Image (cartoon, helix red, strand yellow):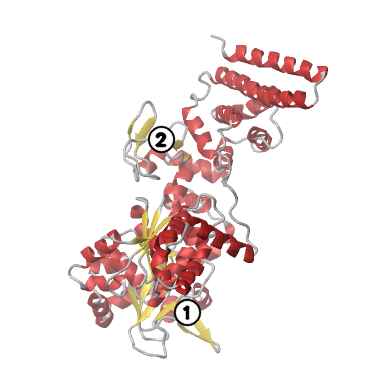
Amino acid sequence: MNQVVEAVKSRLSLKEVVSRYVVLRPAGKGRWKGLCPFHQEKTPSFYVDEDKGLFYCFGCKAGGDLIQFVERIEGLDFKEALRRLAEEAGVAYEAPPESRKRELLWVLEEAQRYFQKGLEKSPQALAYLKGRGLWEETIHRFGLGYAPASFEGLTAHLRKQGIPLEEGIRAGVLAEKEGRVFDRFRNRITFPIKDALGRVVAFSGRTLEASSLEPKYLNSPETALFRKREVLFAYPEARPRLREGRAILVEGLLDAIALHQLGFQESVAVLGSSLSEEQALLLKKQGVQEIYLAFDRDEAGRRATLQSLEREVVRGFLVYAVLLPVKDPGELLLLPEGRDVFAKALAEALPEVEFRMEEATRGLDLTRPEHKRKVLEALAPRMLSPEPFDPVAERLKALVVERLGLSRRALEDFLAGLASSRNQRPPPPPPPLEKPNKTLLLELDVIALILSAPDSQLPKLVQHVAGEVWPPAGSLLGEFLETAKKEPRKDWLRLYFGKKPEGGALFERLLLAPPEEAGLMEKLEHALARLREAYHLERLEALKAELKRNPSQEVLKEIQEVMQAIEAERRTYKKP
């Protein structure tokens, strides 16, 4: 894999890859800048350094190399990003466990071709889609198809392509009963479901027959490629708009397609009753901050909205509930003013707290004490937040006080009693604000300078630094030095430590570090002197505390020695 990484980076330009997503302008020798694709900004703070092979945003602190850029911008993991770049660079990369998945992808690609040809040959299926208001362009963009009524149409097609029927069963497009293999999808409009890479991994089929014996929608079973909680329908098509910070979540696949056609291309559909943790992570990877839940208007849709709000993963977003004047977003295509209707519903969407309050009070008389108690009991789980700075819980408390005519003290007493009865502890007090760790920042300076040296010098520099400082146990620099002795490769070390919480600060320093060998040793000696000074200062504070507890000549003498060492280090880095 290391050889693949090196080959990919040697063949692909970081600047050219980033330029596909960001308009870059020159910012000095070998550097370019532009508006960050990972957060909203008006003044460019995103930089690419071609010589160092790094990108970094001084605004949101996102940083890394070519592979990490593709990981972040496309919402992929490391292996997926590397595979995509390797294919583009013409570098052979095939992890052995993936070979079986490749076979399944081939099966699904053939099934997709069969279904699309089936749509071309079926006036009835095409008429159904156009009757729902879909344009041909939309049908083509989302790859909609039609599975003919035959039990053996796809079976014969796969056999003709030399694909074993067992593979069709494993891919979820064929089924087996009593030893007979047959097409899973028959007389259905097919919706290809794609993963984050845009590959077809499953299908959903909508019947064209009104029958109580057949389900309206039939989905592929879960396979080695497909887990419905890990996929969002229309995610690949929505990705460019999701990066603007907003996502619209709907229930139905046709609902998502309809909203895309109306111009709301940040729309995706959940493949279940509510948003899963894995689906929320897909949205977070694209920088989504606001989620608009546009589920069906009926009782089931309202339950699905509330169910989504209750999930822990949703608390990382600003959530709004869209109340539609029609049954579902798909019906908007049949209205001449459909786009304006949905735009108005978005503008009037209820914030999470307002929607919770509306649902909790629906059908109740708030002048009656027993109804007030019902509202309190419905909203209490969300108000009993373990997070000390939970804005939704605090706003909900304020709304309850206002609407129910309670005092804040009475509400807090009620919640405390409820928490006690459920054996829950009340929320802990807010933690004290931490000051920036100066020693950690100085350690990062040293690490960045080491990683700025040529690979050939890395082991020597690591050895040198290890002999010049004494990182305490558990320190970042201590971990770095030990890791670098075992894996003295810059790319690997940047990847490993870049994923730590301190990764953003590290990449900022890497971008600002001098070019390889340009005054590097002098800067490193000064950085080491400052770091030793910081270690001495921490020791000095500990000794002063010890002197207060147990006054002694030994401690006093050590304090004097440490102060002398601090002055010596200051003379080192203050030399003209």
Q: Identify the element where label 1 is drawn.
A: strand
Compared with residue 385, is residue 206 higher up or lower down, i.e. above or below? below
Q: Which of the two marks, 1 or 2, is nearer to us in this view?
A: 2
Between residue 181 and residue 516, name the one nearer to us: 516
Q: Identify the element where label 2 is drawn.
A: strand
Q: CA distance from mark 1 to mark 2?
A: 48 Å
Q: Earlier in the sequence, mark 1 or mark 2?
A: 2
Within the image, what quadrant is residue 155 found in? Answer: bottom left
Residue 64 on image: x %, y %:
48, 40
Q: For the residue marked with disc 2, what is the amino acid?
A: Val
Residue at the image position 76 percent from the left and 23 percent from the top: 547
Q: For the residue marked with disc 1, what is the amino acid?
A: Leu
Compared with residue 265, is residue 517 higher up or lower down, i.e. above or below? above
Q: Which residue is mark 2?
A: 48
In the figure, is residue 397 to the left or right of 18?
right
Residue 180 on image: x %, y %:
51, 87
Residue at the image position 23 percent from the left and 78 percent from the top: 131
Is there CB contact under 8 Å for labels 1 and 2? no
Compared with residue 248, is residue 451 higher up or lower down, i.e. above or below? above
Does residue 469 show up?
no
Q: Around disc 1, counting alpha carbons within 10 Å, would you say few (fewer than 14), some (14 to 19), or many (20 or more)?
A: many
Residue 113 on image: x %, y %:
36, 71
Q: Around disc 2, counting alpha carbons within 10 Å, would you say few (fewer than 14), some (14 to 19), or many (20 or more)?
A: many
Within the image, what quadrant is residue 194 found in? Answer: bottom left
Residue 103 on image: x %, y %:
50, 67
Does residue 414 show up?
yes
Q: Which mark is residue 194?
A: none
Q: Which residue is mark 1?
A: 174
